[in-house]
Image: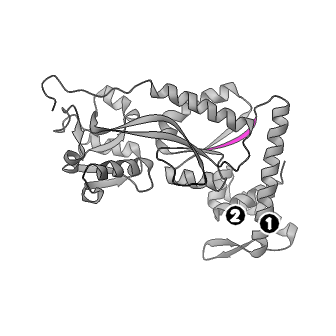
Amino acid sequence: MADRRLQVFYTVARQLSFTKAADILYMTQPAVTFQVKQLEEHFNTRLFERSHGKISLTPVGELVLGYAERILALTGEMEARVGEMTGQVTGPLMIGASTTIAEYQLPRILGEFKERFPQVQARLTVANSETVVSKVADHSLDVGLIEAPSHNSNLKTLACCEDELVMICSPNHPLAGRSSVDAKEIAEQPYVSREHGSGTREVVDDFFKHNGVNPDDLHIEMELGSREAIKGAVEANLGVAIMSASTVTKEVRLGTLVAVPLSPRLTRELSMVYAPEKFRSKLLDAFIAFVESKFQQCATDGVPLKRPAKGRGR
């Protein structure tokens, strides 16, 4: 119900980017620019300074942002309260997810949630864990699902399930027949790594540090932001990598990759984060409870690890 111009302005002001706001709002950039221009004409003043391809808020823009935040929060709370009084779970739900969760766990969960609550409009933003946490903190997202612990003390973090990470390699690799492999052995191999900011990268770097290996000493052949690219590089025997076991289930079953357990075993908690000061609607509560239950089910499914033939283990 809030003025659409105000919604668009708020998103642009939070992102300080017309392009990013357009992506979040599922609008074209010209449409976003038009809405902001309409609001500026309404107030008969500029809300943004534009210089050298960058934008910043004017003093008036800062004032409007403060009011916009309160107006939009109250509007969302009002719609949620009315929906709850009429027994409905409805409305928009802005979800962020790190790439592993978005690609492998979340699609089925979102589909089942939508079947149960068909009037919910779920919108998904996929980014690395660091970006998701940032967007939840600035209220661009209602809830985030991440692969690494949140370092933002202003957010509430709920552990959803345990996820095991394994070393993956080509079936022709010398380590493919091992029953387990440790950090120092991996450090001797060409290594394919995730990018900085990735939840997996953070967890894996900690694993090496805790087991006597400086991550800077790894023989990193390449850093890739795509899991599919990493799997392709490892399949081509360009190096080994450490990934979530859940992301290589198909390849292990097809025999194109081998998943070797780490020693000591490496697990992490997949977590859900949200801003506690933000209004908790019935919709958000329902989604949080639903995700927790579904992740617990996923955690018990198990992922096959290719075991070596008898007598070839360590």
Q: Amino acid at mark 2?
A: Ala
Q: Position of residue 140 (x, y in %)?
A: 66, 53
Q: Is residue 173 left or right of residue 248?
A: left
The residue under the point 54% across, 54% down is 131
Decide: few, some or many residues near mark 1? Use Cα within 10 Å; few <14, some 14-19, many ≥20: some
**Residue 178: image tag:** none
Asked whether the viewer can see residue 110, the reply is no
Number of marks in the image?
2
Q: Residue 13 shows which numbered tag?
A: 2
Cβ atoms under marks 2 and 1 closer than 8 Å = yes
Disc on the earlier residue, 2 or 1: 2
Residue at x 56% of width, y 52% of height: 133
Which quadrant would residue 28 be assigned to in this image? bottom right
Q: Say above or below: 172 vs 307.
A: below
Relative to the observer, which residue lies in front, 36 or 108? 108
The picture places residue 109, in percent across and down from the top left corner, at 57, 30
* Residue 263 inside the magenta-drawn segment: no
Image point 36% across, 41% down: which residue?
Answer: 243
Q: Residue beneath label 1, please?
A: 64
Looking at the image, residue 158 sits to the left or right of residue 203; the answer is right
147 relative position to 78: left or right? left
Local secondary structure at mark 1:
helix
Which stretch is magenta? Answer: 90-95
Q: Nearer the viewer, residue 104 or 198?
A: 198
Label 2 residue SS: helix
Amino acid marked by disc 1: Val
Q: Kindly identify the residue that appears in the image at 40 percent across and 54 percent down.
A: 195
Quadrant where the image shows the C terminus: top left
Viewer-closest of 85 and 193: 85
Residue 34 visible to an observer of this rendering: yes
Residue 265 in which image quadrant = top left
Q: Between 262 and 250, which is closer to the camera in this rendering?
A: 262
